[in-house]
Amino acid sequence: MTNLGIGLVVILGVVLLCLVIQAIRISAREFANRVKQWQLCESHRCVYYTDYLKKGPADLSHSQYHEAVNAHKYWTDSMDEWEGYQGRGGVPTYTARMIQLYRIQARL
């Protein structure tokens, strides 16, 4: 085996090890969701391509779009959690602003 062949085997081994470590760190369901999302993105069938770009020119890159959607989900979940503690209403202004910011960025 040449040095190039050994190098490729080592690189593939490291990538596989990283995937295994990642799979162990997250639940099987979450891992399956990430694989499914990756497949959708790779085939250009994710929401960025099927919805976001149809609403106008891209202000965000593909990865920035998914980060904005995840941030929107995080802040929305935070609001839901806050309302659970405080009853209806009373959501902190900052949380409401963050939700609105990411809703606008991701065109949700």
Image (cartoon, grey):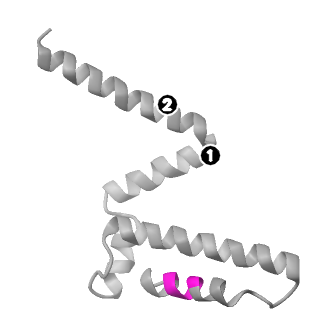
Residue 19: horizontal and vertical position, in percent? 45, 35
Q: CA distance from mark 1 to mark 2?
A: 15 Å
Secondary structure mostly seen in magenta is helix
Say which of 4 and 93 sits in front: 93
- Point out which mark residue 20 bears: 2
Q: Is residue 19 magenta?
A: no
- Give the side of residue 77 with respect to residue 12, left or right: right
Residue 76: horizontal and vertical position, in percent? 65, 76
- Point out which mark residue 29 bears: 1
- Give the side of residue 92 with respect to residue 106, left or right: right
Q: Residues within 10 Å of mark 2 (few under 14, many from 20)?
A: few
**Vertical placement of 9 versus 30: above or below?**
above
**Vertical placement of 21 versus 85: above or below?**
above
**Vertical placement of 91 versus 73: above or below?**
below
| Amino acid type of the residue tagged 1 in the rendering | Arg
Secondary structure beneath dot 2 equals helix
Residue 83: horizontal and vertical position, in percent? 81, 80
Q: Quick one: quadrant of the N terminus?
A: top left
Kindly identify the residue that appears in the image at 40 percent across and 65 percent down: 46
* Sequence-earlier tag: 1 or 2: 2
Tell us which disc is closer to us: 1 or 2.
2
**Vertical placement of 13 versus 51: above or below?**
above
The boundaries of the magenta stretch are 98-102
